[in-house]
């Protein structure tokens, strides 16, 4: 856990969040500033900044998290489809340096991605 990381503090329960799912590897919460009717964040519990910094073990854990997400889509109201996004660095407009996957859906999204 990184003390000054907002997502680490959410994972530790120090900052409240709207939790939809939790297991040993990840948390799925509502984004505080939604950009689609449904906007969740998948937060791996282990702190690393982005995919460039992740280890092979982190990558295997993230794959497990994505598999689980695939099993939760109905429960999350995403049965008609969704989009996954992970911003990295300045050009990607990443604002929180703890790897996270945005899960957007609940409506027809823009065909443009940038
Ligand atoms: P990014 O800009 O890709 O790093 O995404 C960070 C996301 O975290 C943004 O969509 C924010 O709205 C979201 N966010 C920041 N603080 C919180 C919080 N306390 N609870 C839930 N989402 C948050």
Image (cartoon, grey):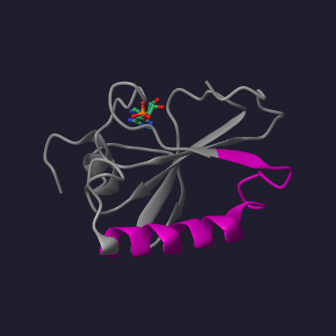
Specify the quarter for ligand 1.
top left
Q: Is 58 inside the magenta-drawn segment?
A: yes
Q: Position of residue 83 (x, y in %)?
A: 68, 44
Residue positioned 15% across, 50% down in the render: 2
Q: Is residue 37 above or below residue 102?
A: above
Q: Position of residue 113 (x, y in %)?
A: 66, 29
Q: Quadrant of residue 67?
A: bottom right
Quadrant showing the C terminus: top right
Specify whether 80 is left or right of 39.
right
Q: Position of residue 14 (x, y in %)?
A: 26, 48
Numbered circles on residues, count: 0
Specify whether 94 is left or right of 39.
left
Quadrant showing the N terminus: bottom left
Residue sitting nearer the eye, 16 or 92: 92
Residue sitting nearer the eye, 114 or 40: 114
Q: Is 107 inside the magenta-drawn segment?
A: no
Specify whether 54 is left or right of 83.
left
Q: Give the magenta range.
A: 57-83
Residue positioned 53% across, 26% down in the render: 33
Residue sitting nearer the eye, 105 or 49: 49
Residue positioned 39% across, 25% down in the render: 91
Specify whether 97 is left or right of 60.
left
Q: Position of residue 71 (x, y in %)?
A: 70, 71
Residue positioned 25% across, 56% down in the render: 47
């Amino acid at each position: 856990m990184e003390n000054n990381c907002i997502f680490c503090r959410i994972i530790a329960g120090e900052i409240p969040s709207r939790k939809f799912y939790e297991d040993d590897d990840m948390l799925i919460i509502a984004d505080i500033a939604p950009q689609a009717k449904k906007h969740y964040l998948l937060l791996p519990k282990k702190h690393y900044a982005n995919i460039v910094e992740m280890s092979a073990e982190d990558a295997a854990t993230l794959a497990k998290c994505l598999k689980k997400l695939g099993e939760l889509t109905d429960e999350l109201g995403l049965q008609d489809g969704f989009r996954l996004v992970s911003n990295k660095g300045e050009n990607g407009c990443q604002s929180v340096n703890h790897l996270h996957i945005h899960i957007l859906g609940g409506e027809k999204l823009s065909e443009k991605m940038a």
